[in-house]
Structure formats: C-alpha cells, structure tokens
Amino acid sequence: MRPAVFKSLLITLTTSGLLALMAPHALAQQDTASLGPAQEPLYNAARDAYQRGEHDKALEILDGLLRLGDLDVAYLEVARNQVALLQCDAAAAALEKANAAGRSGALDQAAFDDAVGAIKGDIAVRCEGQATAQQLYELGVGFFERREWDKAAQAFEKAFEQEPNPTLGYNAGRSYEYAGDLDAAMRFYRAALDLGPEGKAKDKIERTIERLENLSKQMGEARSDVGLIDIVTEPPGAIVRFDGVAVGETPFRQAQAPGKYEVTVTLPGYAEASRTIELEAGQEKLLDITLEDEGYLWTWITLGSSVALAGTGVTFGVLAQNKLDEANEAEVKRSDDFESIKDQGQLFSNLSLTFYGLAGAGLITAAVVYLYESPEENNPGAIPQEDANLHLIVAPDFVGIGGQF
C-alpha cells in the first residue's frame, strides 16, 4: 500500500473512531448501539413493556439483562418501573446502583444526570415522605419552567399538603389550569383563597376564580376539554385582546374554550399585530410576535407643524419689520400713507406673535406625544397589572403570589 494512501486511511479511521466516541446518546432516542447483541433486545423489550404499563414484566426482563452485566441504563429502567409501582425505597436503591455501575455508552454524562434527576423528581412527587415541601416546591418550579404542567401540578399539590399556604395553592391551581383540568384548578384556587391572602393577592385570586367559573359555564360538562393560549411579544407589556376585549398583557398565558379567536396585541410606538387562531381541546397554542417599531409618527407630525408655524411667524416678523422701516421713512417725509403703513406693520407683527405662540404650543404638544409614543412609557389605556389576569411569577425563592415560601 502506498504511504499516502495508508496515511489517508489511517486519518479516516481515527476520525471516525473519535466521532463515534464523542457522539451523544439520549435515553429517549433508545440509542443502544453500545449494548451487546444479547443485551439490546432485552433492553428494548423492557422499555416497550414500560410504555405499555406492564411494569412487573419489565422488571423481570431487566433482571435478566442485569445477569449479563451491570449496566447504568438497566438500573435506570429498573428505578423507573419501581417508581411506577410505588416501590420507592427500591427505586432509590436502584439509582444508587446506577451511579456505581459501569457506563454502557448509551448515555453521555449529561444525559445520565438528567435521567437520574427526572427519576428522583418522580420519586419525590409520587412517593409519600420522600421529599420536603421545599424540595417539592423546587421540583414544581422546574417542571413548570419546562412546561410539564401535570408534573408541576402534582409537585405543588404535594407541597401544599405538607405546608398549606396561598402561594403553593395558587401554583397548584395555575398548573392544573394550564394542564386543562379546570375542576382541580378551581379546587386549589379556592383552597388558596380560604387561607386568607390579603390585598391585591386576594383580589387577583377572586378574579381568577370568577374567570374560570365563567369558562366552566361556557364549557358545560366538558370542563376539562380546554386549550391553552400562550402569547409572548418582543418587547413585552403589550395589551392582548380576544375579539376586541382586553384580557391582559404579554407575556400572557390562559386556559380557553376551544374555538376561533381574533387576537390583537398593541403597544404604544409599535404597529398593532393581529392573528387569527383556532384552538382545539387539549392543545397549547403559542404565539411569538415581534412588534414592528412604528417610530414616532405623530411626534414628527406635530414637530414638523411647529417648525412650519415658527417659519410662518418669522416670515410675518420680517414683513412687520419692513413695514416699520417704511412707516419710519413715511413719517420723516410726512407722507399721507404713514398711518396705513403703520397699521399693516402692526398687523404683521400681531400675526408673527400669533404664529410664534402656536409654534410654542406645538412644541409642547410634540413633547407630550413623544412621551405617549415612547415604548418605555406605560400605555394610559393599558390594563393596570393588578387588574390583568394573574400570571405565575417565577423567581429563585418565590413562585406565584403573595409573600414568600
């Protein structure tokens, strides 16, 4: 073999080997190329049994798989099935074995850590006494941020059972609402209200309950067959209207009855944006709208008008000065038209002052319009935040409303 050809082949084989080692393998993709020929069919059969809800059968298959060797992914699957069967202590032990077992190559470290974290979250939510209220609260925040509404609702509900307070009750209600379960949402909103939140927090929960009661009446017996509308704009703070009725500000998220809606968003200084959406039961519809800068149209119009008025004032001022010069010359010559020239000059002077005054008023108007059109300013026609629909607030130490958990 020629040296050049051999060198090229060596580089190709080396590169291919490195790429194979570096390629990430996700558990969700069931990439089991690194499992042995006897292990891969068992692993896939166990996962299929889990998906069908046959957890005892899945555990039997995994027991056979583990007899062929300790594998991290096998212990992870054992833990998942044991959580489903509420064998919580056994599931926790399986996670420890997964950490100690050799890596199969089916998961990189990041994917392995994510899988372990997800199973720990399931253990905390599904198994009594496995997590504190604070831990459940933190899990709920994570689930909510990942838009896993059902899991977020379960975590907040468990936390609320341990430490009843309006914040956790509200968070559970909001998560159930986003999951489309209005009955459960109403139950937790009312529970939060019964715990006595004060001031604006109380008012907001009451308005939320009233909104869901109206939605429940609209839905009839199909109260769980709602959809979820999620609207974000750049920049945020735009007024959202459904069929012409203001319902809140962006970022906006709310359960809604299935149907066709004309959605408009408005923000001072930006062009109005409209979208027509058709929402189906159980569907989440996301609108991500970048508002187009309208510029300062009326500011420039009023400013331009002011400049034009000032220019007219200058013109009449020049004419007035000319007439004054003519009047002085006529007075020296004792001309008969002295009075007429003087009257014309006075008229031009008055007109000049009038246009100067109008130009000054125009400049003030332009300043007011500029403030109104400025995107940084609040829209006087906007719904105040305390009157808008309540949104879940996520912060490092707080989720929801009213105080701190």
Image (cartoon, helix red, strand yellow):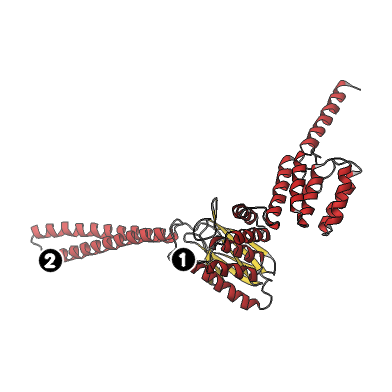
The residue that label 2 is drawn on is 339
Q: Is residue 237 left or right of residue 173?
A: left
Farthest top residue in view: 3
Q: Is residue 398 left or right of residue 176?
A: left
State the image quarter where residue 127 is shown. bottom right
Q: Secondary structure at mark 2?
A: helix
Asked if the residue under mark 2 is in contact with the one under mark 1, i.e. CB atoms within 8 Å, the reply is no
Q: Residue at x 65, y 53 (%)?
A: 131
Q: Residue at x 30, y 60 (%)?
A: 359
State the image quarter where residue 341 is shown. bottom left
Image x and y of residue 284, in percent = 67, 63
Q: Residue at x 90, y 48 (%)?
A: 41
- Quarter of the picture containing the N terminus is top right
The residue that label 1 is drawn on is 198
Comparing 195 with 48, the one in front is 195
Answer whether residue 124 is visible to the viewer in this image: yes
Q: Secondary structure at mark 1?
A: loop
Answer whether residue 383 is visible to the viewer in this image: no
Image x and y of residue 310, in percent = 30, 58
The amino acid type found where label 1 is placed reads: Glu
